[in-house]
Amino acid sequence: MAKSGYNASFLLLISMFLILLAFSNVVEGYNKLRPRDCKPRCTYRCSATSHKKPCMFFCQKCCATCLCVPKGVYGNKQSCPCYNNWKTQEGKPKCP
């Protein structure tokens, strides 16, 4: 009987750990994309510009490196620090 109680406690502990792990990945990795998610996110990000081709090129390059694209068509770069902090040699933002 003690072994059955031990197994139930162990399964409960493992289940709680997996739920906590899944939740922490959701919270910490909110902006983490898979590489295949970059094109649709960049398509939306670049939808309001008249310079779509260079916007898409740099957005996809930044997304491939950072695995993040800020929400919206402009601004909100603080949600993606890598995307926000990547600069050109002149010190201008590299990512749209």
Image: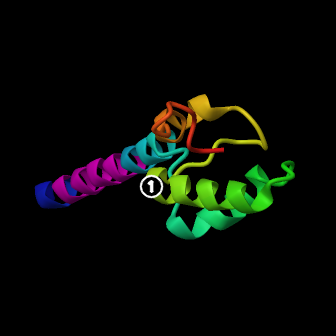
The image shows residue 10, relative to residue 85, as above or below, that is below
Task: Name the spot of residue 67 as percent of width and height, x first.
Answer: 49, 54
Q: Quadrant of residue 73?
A: top right
Q: Is residue 37 left or right of residue 89?
A: right
Crowding at mark 1 (Cα within 10 Å: few <14, some 14-19, many 20+): few
Quarter of the image for the N terminus: give it: bottom left
Camera-side residue: 11 or 51? 51
Q: Residue furthest bottom?
A: 36
Task: Name the spot of residue 38 as percent of width and height, x first.
Answer: 61, 62
Q: Please, what is the dominant secondary structure of the magenta stretch?
A: helix
Q: Would residue 11 be counted in the magenta stretch? A: yes
Q: Report the number of numbered marks.
A: 1
Camera-side residue: 19 or 35? 35
Task: Name the spot of residue 48 as percent of width and height, x first.
Answer: 87, 48
Q: Which residues are magenta?
A: 6-19
Task: Give the amino acid type for the residue marked by disc 1 in the picture.
Answer: Thr
Q: Quadrant of residue 60?
A: bottom right
The image shows residue 82, relative to residue 91, as above or below, that is below
Residue located 50% across and 51% down the image: 32
Residue located 70% across and 42% down the image: 71
Residue under label 1: 65
Q: Is residue 16 left or right of residue 47?
A: left
Quarter of the image for the C terminus: give it: top right
Q: Would residue 42 be counted in the magenta stretch? A: no
- SS for tag 1? helix
Camera-side residue: 90 or 94? 90
Residue located 80% across and 54% down the image: 51
